[in-house]
Image (cartoon, rainbow, N blue to C red):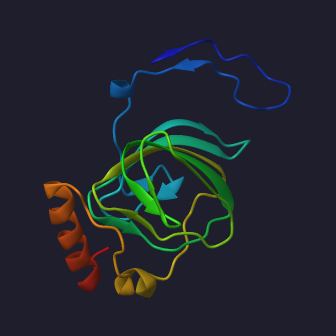
């Protein structure tokens, strides 16, 4: 990772220049450095975190069949789909499509064939949802790939068993 020397900033923001190759950042899961707790199966690459601004830039990968329930968080987020499909708010989103969310309830998000996104959070990214909502969720979007079909079946099984 190439980084310029950090200069002391009067405003306390991180003004470090970064140029990062994707392969230089490892995928992480579970509790990401105390910044974000992830459900099983979800992975992230943290690209930048500024604790003063409370800004978190990262890539996030959702496995085929994954469902993120209706939720809230005390932050806004900007999401750009980079690979796969994200289905939300009646739209089947593909690479290049965009989502913006705030601290009002939003979702559920379905990822019938898996998905990778670039996401920026400003504020507390911790998600709050009712587990019962996830267990009761009825998938709307159909997968278009073999791996997606298998993933949807597996995720429904995990939800019913309470393992998500």
Q: Position of residue 20 (x, y in %)?
A: 46, 21
22 above or below 40? above
Which quarter of the rendering shows the C terminus? bottom left
Towards the viewer: 141 or 59: 141
Which quarter of the rendering shows the N terminus? top left
Towards the viewer: 105 or 42: 105
Task: Answer with left or right where residue 16 lies relative to residue 163.
Answer: right
Q: Position of residue 24 (x, y in %)?
A: 36, 25
Figure quadrant of residue 31: bottom left
Task: Answer with left or right where residue 107 lies relative to residue 139.
Answer: right
Q: Position of residue 83 (x, y in %)?
A: 36, 42
How many numbered marks appear? 0
Q: Position of residue 10 (x, y in %)?
A: 86, 25
122 above or below 112? above
Figure quadrant of residue 42: bottom left
Figure quadrant of residue 52: top right
Task: Answer with left or right where residue 20 lies relative to residue 137.
Answer: right
Residue at the spot x=23%, y=57% of the render?
144
Towards the viewer: 65 or 143: 143
Residue at the spot x=42%, y=60% of the render?
38
Residue at the spot x=43%, y=41% of the render?
95
Residue at the spot x=38%, y=27% of the render?
22
């Amino acid at each position: 990772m190439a980084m310029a020397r950090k200069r002391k900033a009067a405003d306390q923001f991180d003004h470090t220049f970064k140029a990062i190759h994707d392969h230089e950042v490892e995928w992480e899961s579970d509790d990401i450095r105390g910044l974000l707790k992830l459900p099983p199966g979800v992975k992230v690459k943290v690209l930048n975190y500024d604790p003063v601004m409370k800004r978190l830039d990262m890539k996030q990968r959702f496995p085929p069949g994954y469902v993120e329930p209706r939720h809230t968080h005390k932050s806004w987020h900007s999401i750009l789909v980079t690979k796969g499909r994200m289905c939300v708010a009646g739209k089947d989103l593909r690479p290049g499509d965009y989502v913006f969310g705030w601290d009002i309830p939003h979702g559920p998000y379905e990822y019938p064939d898996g998905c990778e996104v670039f996401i920026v959070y400003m504020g507390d990214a911790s998600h709050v949802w009712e587990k019962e909502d996830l267990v009761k969720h009825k998938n709307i979007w159909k997968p278009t790939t073999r791996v997606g079909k298998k993933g949807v079946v597996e995720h429904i099984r995990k939800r019913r068993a309470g393992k998500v």
